[in-house]
C-alpha cells in the first residue's frame, strides 16, 4: 500500500516551495513592487497601475493577508505578468515549454536506456577489461559538467566541422514544412541532446552496474543457472530486470537533474526552451518569469517523484511490506 | 565498520588517481600567488592575445591574463567546495545523529523536513534565491550548505540507529552516559568513513554548483570563477580563443569533479560492502 508518510512529505515540500516563492520577494529590502514585478514594471508604472498592483497582492496589508491574496491568485492559475515580454507569465512559459520537454524527454529516455543496458553488460562482466574501461570512461564522462560537454560538442561539430547548427531550435524564416521541418528540428536537437545524454549517462549506468553486482550474488541467480537457462535469459530477465528497480526510483531525481542541466545546455546552444527563458529573465531581472519557472519546475519534479513513488510498490512487491 | 577507508582508496587505481588530482588542485590553489605571473583582476588594453611566453594562455576580452585567472579560479572552486562539504556534513551529522538518539516528535519533525527537502530540486531553488540576492562567496557557501545537508542526515540517522543498539553503546549508557556524551564519544567516531564519503560528494556537488551559477551569471562578478570564465569564453566561440580560454578552464573544472568522483567511488564500499573488490582495479 502507498504510505501516508510519502503524501505528507510531498505536501510539506509543496508548502515549502510556495512559501519560498511568496516570502522571498517580500522580504527583500527596497520596494516589494520591483521584487515582485521586475525592473521592467517600473518603466511602465503609472499611479493607477501601481494602485492596481498593490491591490492585487494586498501589499498594503499585513503579511498574512498578502499570503491569502497570493494563494487566491495562484489557484486561479495566475502566475503574474511579465512586463519585459509584455505578456502573462503562464503564456510565455507555455510557449517555451515544448522545446524543453522535447530536449528533456529525449535525453532522459536515451541516457536511462543506454545506462541500463551498459550497466547490465558491465556488471555481468564485472572485473573484465570491458567492464573496467566502461566504468572508468563513464565515470570520467560523469565528471564533465553538462555545459562544458555542450560547448565541446558545439565547437567540434558546429564550429570546426560545421555539420550541425550553432544555435536555436529551428532555421529562422526557412518556411519549411512536413518532413523537411522535422529534419530541421532534429538537426538542431542533436547536439543539445547528445550533451545532456552523455552528461547523465553515468548516473543510470553506475547504479545499474552496482545493483547488478549485488543481484548476481543472490541465491536465485544460482538456481536459475542450475536450471540451465541461457546466458541471455539469466542476464536480462533474472539479473537485469531486478537491477532496474533502483533506477526507477531515481528517475525522479534524475529528471530534476536533467531539467536543471537543460537550463545550462539551452544557454550554450541558445535553444529557446524554458532554460534559455530563465537565463534571459535573470539578465533582465524579470522576476515574475523567474518565479513562474521556479514554481513550474519545482512542482513538476515533485509530481513526477510522487508518481514514481506511487508506482514503485507495483514494480517491486517487496517494497509494500516495508511500510 | 571493519573496512579501512584509507586502504580502500589507496588500493584502488582510480581512488589513487583521484587523490593525486585533488592534491594537485589543492596545491595549485594554495600556491596561486606564486604560480600566477599577473594579478588575475588586472585589466589591460592587450585583449584577446594568443598564448605567448609572457601570457601562457593568452588574455581575455578585457586583457586579463587567462593563466593567472585559471590558477586563482581553483581557489574559489575549492573554497566553496570544501566550505560546503564541511558545513553540510556537519549539519547532516548533527541532525541525523540527534534525530536517532532523541527520537520521538523531534525525530519525526526533522525527518519530515529532510524528506521534503530531498524531493525539491535544489538547483532551481538556488537560482531563485540567487536571482534576488546575488550571493557572494560566503553567502553562497551558507546557501548551498543549508540546501544540501538533508541526504547526509538520512544516512547518518540510519547508521546511528543501528549503532545505538550495539553492545558498547548500551554499556556506556548503563554507566550513566548522557545522550550528548554517547553521540560524541561512541556514535560519531564510528560514523567516520561514512562522513568522509558524504563529505566528498558534498564537495563535488558544491564545486559543480558554484561553476554552474557563475556560468548563469548569478554569482559575485568581482570574484574570479571558472564558471564565469567559461561563460565569457563562450561568447567568443567563433574565434579560435576557445583553445586556450575555454578548454583549459573546462578541463580544470572537470578534473576536480572527476577526481572527487573517483575517490567517492573507491570509498563507496564503506556504505555498500558488497561492492568490494569490483571497482576498476
Image: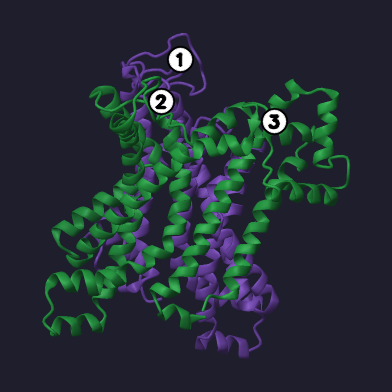
Chain colours: A green, B purple
**Label 1 marks which chain's residue?**
B
| Quadrant the N terminus of chain B occupies | bottom left
Report crowding for label 3: few under 14, some 14 to 19, many 20 or more residues within 10 A (C-alpha).
many
Question: How busy is the neighbourhood of tag 1: few (under 14 within 10 Å), some, or many (20 plus)?
Answer: some
Chain for numbered disc 2: B
Q: Is mark 2 on a helix, strand or loop?
A: helix
User: Where residue A149 sits in the image (x, y, percent)?
Assistant: 34, 37
Residue B63: numbered disc: 1
- Residue B276 visible to the viewer: no
Disc 1 vs disc 3: Cβ atoms closer than 8 Å?
Answer: no
* The C terminus of chain B lies in quadrant: bottom left
Q: Is mark 1 on a helix, strand or loop?
A: loop
Residue linked to disc 3: A38
Disc 1 and disc 2 on one polypeptide chain = yes
Q: In the shown orientation, is residue A11 left or right of residue B78?
A: right
As rendered, which of A4 and B34 lies closer to the eye? A4
User: Toward the viewer: B114 or B206?
Assistant: B114
Residue occupying the point 80% across, 32% down? A31
Residue under numbered circle 2: B234
Residue B181 lies, in percent from the top left, at 63, 76
In percent of the image, x 47 and y 60: which residue is there?
A: B198
Subunit under mark 3: A
Amino acid at each position: 500500500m502507498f504510505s501516508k508518510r510519502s503524501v505528507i512529505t510531498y505536501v510539506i515540500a509543496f508548502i515549502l516551495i510556495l512559501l519560498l516563492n511568496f516570502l522571498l520577494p517580500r522580504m527583500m529590502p527596497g520596494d516589494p513592487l520591483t521584487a515582485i514585478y521586475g525592473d521592467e514594471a517600473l518603466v511602465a508604472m503609472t499611479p493607477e497601475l501601481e494602485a492596481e498592483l498593490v491591490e492585487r497582492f494586498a501589499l498594503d496589508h499585513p503579511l498574512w493577508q498578502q499570503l491569502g491574496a497570493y494563494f487566491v491568485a495562484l489557484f486561479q492559475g495566475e502566475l503574474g505578468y511579465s512586463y519585459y515580454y509584455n505578456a502573462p507569465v503562464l503564456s510565455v512559459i507555455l510557449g517555451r515549454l515544448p522545446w524543453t520537454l522535447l530536449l528533456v524527454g529525449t535525453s532522459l529516455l536515451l541516457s536511462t536506456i543506454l545506462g541500463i543496458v551498459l550497466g547490465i553488460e558491465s556488471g555481468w562482466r564485472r572485473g573484465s577489461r570491458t567492464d573496467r574501461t566502461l566504468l572508468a570512461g563513464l565515470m570520467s564522462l560523469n565528471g564533465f559538467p553538462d555545459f562544458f560537454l555542450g560547448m565541446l560538442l558545439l565547437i567540434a561539430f558546429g564550429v570546426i566541422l560545421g555539420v550541425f547548427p550553432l544555435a536555436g531550435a529551428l532555421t529562422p524564416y526557412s518556411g519549411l514544412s512536413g518532413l523537411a521541418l522535422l529534419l530541421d528540428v532534429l538537426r538542431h536537437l542533436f547536439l543539445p541532446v547528445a550533451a545532456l545524454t552523455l552528461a547523465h549517462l553515468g548516473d543510470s549506468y553506475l547504479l545499474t552496474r552496482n545493483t547488478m553486482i549485488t543481484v548476481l550474488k543472490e541465491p536465485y541467480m544460482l538456481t536459475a543457472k542450475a536450471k540451465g537457462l541461457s546466458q541471455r535469459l539469466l542476464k536480462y530477465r533474472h539479473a537485469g530486470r531486478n537491477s532496474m528497480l533502483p533506477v526507477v526510483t531515481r528517475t525522479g531525481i534524475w529528471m530534476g537533474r536533467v531539467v536543471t542541466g537543460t537550463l545550462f545546455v539551452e544557454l550554450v546552444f541558445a535553444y529557446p526552451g524554458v532554460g534559455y527563458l530563465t537565463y534571459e529573465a535573470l539578465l533582465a531581472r524579470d522576476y515574475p518569469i523567474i518565479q513562474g519557472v521556479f514554481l513550474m519546475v519545482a512542482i513538476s519534479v515533485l509530481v513526477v517523484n510522487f508518481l514514481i513513488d506511487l508506482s514503485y510498490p507495483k514494480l517491486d512487491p517487496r517494497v509494500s511490506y516495508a511500510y | 565498520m571493519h573496512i579501512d577507508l584509507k586502504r580502500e582508496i589507496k588500493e584502488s587505481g582510480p581512488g589513487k588517481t583521484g587523490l593525486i588530482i585533488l592534491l594537485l588542485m589543492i596545491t595549485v590553489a594554495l600556491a596561486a600567488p606564486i604560480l600566477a605571473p599577473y594579478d588575475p583582476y588586472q585589466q589591460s588594453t592587450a585583449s584577446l592575445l594568443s598564448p605567448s611566453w609572457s601570457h601562457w594562455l593568452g588574455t581575455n576580452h578585457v586583457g586579463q591574463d587567462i593563466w593567472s585567472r585559471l590558477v586563482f579560479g581553483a581557489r574559489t572552486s575549492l573554497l566553496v567546495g570544501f566550505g560546503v562539504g564541511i558545513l553540510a556534513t556537519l549539519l547532516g551529522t548533527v541532525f541525523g545523529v540527534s534525530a536517532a538518539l532523541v527520537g520521538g516528535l523531534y525525530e519525526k519533525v526533522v525527518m519530515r523536513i529532510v524528506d521534503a527537502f530531498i524531493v525539491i530540486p535544489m538547483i532551481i531553488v538556488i537560482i531563485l534565491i540567487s536571482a534576488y540576492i546575488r550571493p557572494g562567496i560566503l553567502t553562497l557557501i551558507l546557501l548551498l550548505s543549508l540546501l544540501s545537508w538533508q541526504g547526509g542526515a538520512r544516512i547518518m540517522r540510519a547508521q546511528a540507529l543501528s549503532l545505538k543498539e550495539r553492545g558498547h553503546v548500551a554499556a556506556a549508557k548503563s554507566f550513566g552516559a548522557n545522550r550528548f556524551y554517547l553521540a560524541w564519544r561512541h556514535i560519531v567516531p564510528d560514523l567516520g568513513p561514512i562522513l568522509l564519503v558524504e563529505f566528498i560528494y558534498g564537495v563535488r556537488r558544491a564545486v559543480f554548483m558554484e561553476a554552474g551559477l557563475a556560468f548563469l551569471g548569478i554569482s559575485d562578478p568581482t570574484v574570479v570563477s571558472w564558471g564565469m570564465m567559461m561563460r565569457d569564453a563562450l561568447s567568443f566561440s567563433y574565434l579560435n580563443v576557445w583553445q586556450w580560454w575555454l578548454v583549459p578552464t573546462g578541463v580544470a573544472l572537470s578534473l576536480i569533479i572527476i577526481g572527487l568522483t573517483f575517490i567517492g567511488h573507491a570509498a563507496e564500499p564503506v556504505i555498500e560492502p558488497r561492492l568490494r573488490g569490483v571497482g576498476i582495479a
